[in-house]
Image (spheres, rainbow, N blue to C red):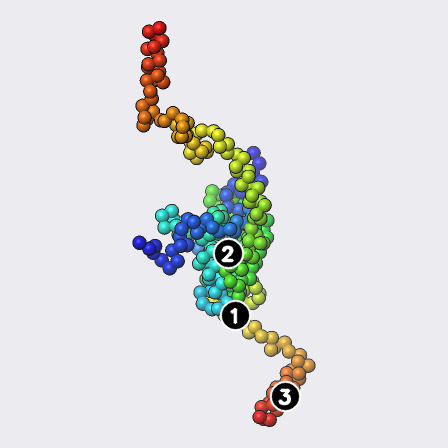
Amino acid sequence: MSVPRGAVHAKWIVGKVIGTKMQKTAKVRVTRLVLDPYLLKFFNKRKTYFAHDPLQQCTVGDIVLLKALPERRSKHVKHELAEIVFKVGNVIDPITGKPCAGTRFLENLSDSENLTEADTTYLSEKLQELKVGSTDK
Amino acid sequence: MPMKGRFPIRRTLQYLSQGDVIFKSSVKVMTVNYNTAGELSEGARKFVFFNIPQIQYKNPWVQIMLFRNMTPSPFLRFYLDNGEQVLVDVEDKTNKEITEHIKKILGKSKETLEKEERERRKQSHPATFGPKKYHLRECMCEIEGQVPCPAFVPLPKEMRGKYKAAMKNEA
């Protein structure tokens, strides 16, 4: 009987790290939406998984992507850390690639530091034109 | 007596089964990052409010995670079975546009769905009898025009084994 991958049903899961007290292992809480049969509303149901983290690079609060191991590593560890999606305190916005915190960016998005000489002269000329225009009125 | 809640129609089976986004089998995890305030996130918020229940109902084995107010821009991220990640920017899109887009990129096409439906119909034979889970009918007595179930209507004398055995012994 050949099981190519996963002695476990969940091949890829995303969860939040809740504990790193174990050596080279992270405790990850995974939430799934489960339909309540009477209310017909989806609620989060949580389940904890243990993931192998050889470099101990997870901290509590990280959002991580876990990959199922081909065979169980120990009694409870059936997954390993594939990548850290969002590092706590150091979230990088994937669309722009810039660090952010909550709904604002941490660094200045405009590129006023990288202007060349030609750009600054061009802009100052434009400003001069605008000033002249306003005095005419 | 009206239902409780803001848009309780979201909590009806008819609404849930009307979802038309069925993901390909390679999609394992769907992550939605959106903000609770701001015009740009409005479409994403409507998407989460109205369409996520439909998607989860149709795809019970896809893990859906929602993240609020983590990044300034709203986006969707799909994690596929081969390790690939699909990033979908949903800034300034209405929820209808978002569903159309993900249906186009990661949804099963209509031909695949029809093919699966035909396969399922081929598996189950309509003329067999058995448990309700696998067959249409359990007993011949359920069909109109056939002999009714003796549990409700006693069989006529001539059909009962007791009478038939007595007639045979008499002769």
Amino acid type at circle 2 is: Thr
Residue at numbered disc 1: A105
Mark 3 or 2, closer to the camera: 3
Between residues A52 and B129, which one lies in front from this camera angle? Answer: B129
Secondary structure at numbered mark 3: helix
Q: Are marks 2 and 1 in contact (CB under 8 Å)?
A: no
Residue count near mark 2 (Cα–Cα under 10 Å), binned few <14, some 14–19, many ≥20: some
Secondary structure at numbered mark 2: strand
Residue B132 position within the rendered picture, expressed as x and y whole percent measured from the top left: 42, 34
In this picture, is B52 found above or below B135?
Answer: below
Residue at image x 65%, y 86%? Answer: A125
How far apart marks 3 and 2 lie (CA) works out to 50 Å
Q: Are marks 3 and 1 in contact (CB under 8 Å)?
A: no
Q: Chain of mark 2?
A: B
Image side of residue B156 versus residue A126, left or right: left
In this picture, is A129 found above or below A101?
Answer: below
Amino acid type at circle 3 is: Glu
Q: Is disc 1 on the same chain as disc 3?
A: yes
Residue count near mark 1 (Cα–Cα under 10 Å), binned few <14, some 14–19, many ≥20: some
Residue at numbered disc 3: A129
Tell me if residue A76 can be seen.
yes
Amino acid type at circle 1 is: Phe
Where the C terminus of chain A falls, by quadrant? bottom right
Residue at image x 60%, y 75%? Answer: A111
Q: Extreme bottom residue here? A: A136
In this picture, is A104 found above or below B168?
Answer: below
Label disc, if present, on residue B31 of the rendered structure: 2
Label disc, if present, on residue A33 of the rendered structure: none
